[in-house]
Structure formats: structure tokens, C-alpha cells
Amino acid sequence: MSLIAITEVKKRFGDNEVLKGISIDIAPGEVVAIIGKSGSGKSTLLRCINGLETIDEGSIVVAGAQFLPDEVHLKALRLKVGMIFQQFNLFPHLTAGGNVMLSQMVVKKTPKKNAEAVARKMLDRVGLAHKFDALPDELSGGQQQRVAIARALAMQPIALLCDEITSALDPELVAEVLAVVRELAAEGMTLVMVTHEMRFARDVCSRVVFMHQGRVHEIGAPEDVFANPRTPELRQFLGVQ
Amino acid sequence: MTEFSFWDILRNLLLAARWTVVLSLVSFVGGGIVGAALLFLRIGGRQWLRLLSRGYIQLFQGTPLLMQLFLAFFGLGLFGIDVPAWLAACVALILWTAAFLAEIWRGCVESIAKGQWEASASLGMGYLQQMRYVILPQALKVAVPPTVGFSVQVVKGTALTSIIGFVELSKAGSIVTNATFQPFTVYGLVALIYFALCWPLSKSSQLLERKLNVAHRNH
């Protein structure tokens, strides 16, 4: 049974139809890369799965939680899927530890002591146990993004959505973030990532989705998609003739 | 005819300045509370509450404080309600301050990056939780300097209440002038006292701005 079932999803911004009927089923433990040009709708799709954008038609079901745009349903959905953003979006007024603790205490009503224990564990998992008391200001981009991953993990999601999480990083910091993601994938976390890191997608992902003009243009195992692109659009995107 | 010494004049003005201070504090605190309520309606409430709050703010920002004072003082009198000058002064100044503070604070809340809303939403927080734990702690820091800066306008705004007969610093100035026939000395002192009240506020607004800016280095 699929963990994330996306069925015939359509999304319009005014007259501009960004998603023109997307259907993807994602099984537990799958690591799916969504690639495509900017404007192809890949980020919008990801944001729809987390309820940051409403959908106009179709349905999105995550482990039985239906996407409906009211606060109760949204909360249920968001407790199941965590999201990591391109710009990290750490809370600048809280320490790294505070960032990881906040939603546990506020949303799950976890007692402070337990939340702190979880926060330390999660920061350790991303290799930043020693930065518990550092403010986001005092961390490098790569470290900030790893705190953001720890923050999402602390809510014990069953899937993580990654929206171009290395695009705002200096090249030398990309590897440390990808290493964490690779580890999560190895541990069996379900991941859906919009990415420009083709090599990473090829190495780590179980499936690659190529989006073009609001549609799923090609979908398949990375070996197939990267080695034998069937459509001219994908060939052009990958830069092969 | 009685002679008034310089110290008589100064003493009387300083006694009256107490009322300027009290009226400023009442307006500022009361205006802050009403302003906070307006802010929440303005950015989070239902559509009609939002419009109501916006209308209120535009009305009070778009009419002179003097007219608002007149309306509070004489307007209610038309309905047979006898409003003492101090009450009309407090009510008008509170409502006026609230409109400006609500608008200043709205700007501060909206200056917080959209990503903060999205990140907190994606972690499952509801609107009030986002406000309480993520947005307001950051917005408050941004809000402190302009809020303290605006308090200067409130202090100066209290001068207008002299027109409806509330005896604060400006009104005391006219009364003392009428008794002493020394308008230059008296109004000079009045101006100096206002300056002594306002300058520390402007200065601290500047200092706070510099100090709190630290929190926003990374944006």
C-alpha cells in the first residue's frame, strides 16, 4: 500500500495552471527525487503535500490522512510529513536546541525535559550535538540546514519533504547535508526531494520523477531515467543528445 | 499687583507637567492595549473584523487629533452625557494612539519572513501558536524602537487637550502667561519641559534601534 497517494492533483494560481493532473504513489521507505526546470511545478507539488498550498482538484492522502484545508486536517497531515526548506527557516530567536524543542512542546505538549532529550538525540544524529546552545546566526548554512532536519525529525514524521535543501548552500557545505539525507534514506525514511543534485538523485533515490509544464513527464528508476531518457524534454534537461 | 518670581512660574509649570506625564502614560498604555487588539483583528480576524479594524485605523489616522478631542468632549454632550475634560482627553488620546500603534505593529509582524510562517506551519503549529512562539517574539524586537519613537508623538499630542480645558503643561502655560504677562519666559519654559520629556525618548529609541538590530543580522 502506498504511503503517499497523489491522485489527479490540479493547482492553479489565477489563470496559470501550475499542476495539470499529477498522480504519483509513493511506497513506505521510497526515496523519490523530483527533477525538472524551474516553473515545472515541482516545488508547488511538494508544498501541496504538506498543505502549504491548497489544491484545486484531486486528492492527496498521506498514511490515511486526507488533505483538507482546515486546521484539524492540516495538523494531522503535518504531523506525518516534515518539511525542509531551501532557506532553512530556523527560528532566529531560539538556539539550535530551542528550535528542535519548540514544536514538540507546543504541538505535541511533550514535557520540556523529554523534548530536550529528544532534541539532543536528534542534533546528535545530524552531527551537531555540540551546537545545542548556538543561535542560528552563529552556524554555517550547512549546519543550519542540519538543525532544520533535526527539527523536522523531532516530530517523528513518517515522511520528509525536502525542497531544494542544498540550493542555498555554498558548494563545500552541500556534502555534509547530503550525507545526513543519505543516512536517513539508508535507515528507511520515506523521502520526497526536489533537487538539482543529479548525482545524488542517481545514487540514493529509488525513483526519479521528471516534471515538465505541470505534468509528470517521465517517471522511473534512476538508471532508466538518467541512462535512457525517452523524451526530448528530459534529454534536453539532462544535457544529453 | 502680585509679582511672580521665575521660580513661581517654573514651580507651577512643573506641577502641571505631572498631568502631561500622567496623560501620556495613560494614553500610551491604554493605546497599547487597544492597539494590540486592533492588530490581531487586522491581521488574523475574519474578513469583516479585518475591514472594521482597517476602517478604524484609517478614520483615526485620517482626521486631526483635535477633531477627535472635540468630538469626544462635545459630541457626547449632545446626548446629554456630561463628559469631564480629563475623561474626554484620555479616551480620545487612547483611541488615537491605538490606531497608530496597531499600524506600526502590523508593519513589524509583516516584516517577519514568510518562511517563518511556513516552517512553523509545517511543524504542525496553529495560528495562535505561530504568533505566540515564533512571530511575535521576533516582531516585538523589531517593534520596540518605532514604538518608543512614537511615544514622543503621544507626549506632544497631549498638548492639544488644553483646548478642551484639561489643565496640563500647555494649559498651565496659558494660565500662567495671563497672570504674569511674560509669554516668552513662560512658553520658553514650557517648550523646554516638553523637550526634557521627549528627548530621552527619542534618544532611547535610537539606541534601542542600534542594539536590537543585532538580532536581524542574518536576514
Image (tube, rainbow, N blue to C red):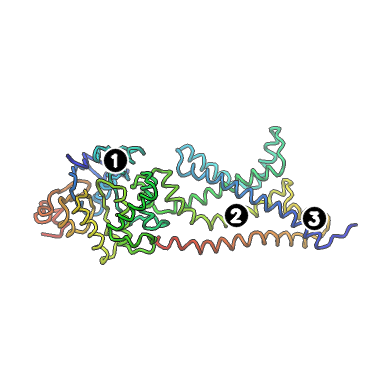
Few, some or many C-alpha atoms within 10 Å of disc 2 (few <14, some 14-19, many ≥20)?
A: many
In the picture provided, is A197 more to the left or to the right than B125? left
- Residue B16 location, x and y as percent? 74, 53
Element class at badge 3: helix
- Residue B72 location, x and y as percent? 66, 41
- Specify the label residue B151 is tagged with: 2
Chain letter, disc 3 residue: B
In the picture provided, is B80 more to the left or to the right than A87? right
Element class at badge 1: loop
The mark lying in front, picked from 3 and 2, is 2
> Which of the 4 image quadrants contains residue A202?
bottom left
> Which of the 4 image quadrants contains residue A90?
bottom left
Few, some or many C-alpha atoms within 10 Å of disc 3 (few <14, some 14-19, many ≥20)?
A: many
First along the sequence among labels 3 and 2: 2
**Circle 1: residue type:** Ile
Nearest to the observer: residue A232 or residue B199: B199
Q: Quadrant of the C terminus of chain A?
A: bottom left
Circles 1 and 3 on the same subunit = no
Looking at the picture, does residue A216 appear above or below residue B9? Answer: above
Q: Residue furthest top?
A: B80
Q: How far is the residue under mark 1 from the one under mark 3? A: 71 Å
- Specify the label residue A55 is tagged with: 1
Is residue B74 among the parts visible in the rendering? yes
Q: Quadrant of the N terminus of chain A?
A: top left
Residue wearing tag 3:
B176
Q: How far is the residue under mark 1 from the one under mark 2? A: 46 Å
Circles 3 and 2 on the same subunit = yes
The mark lying in front, picked from 1 and 2, is 2
**Circle 3: residue type:** Val
Looking at the picture, does residue B111 appear above or below residue B60? Answer: below
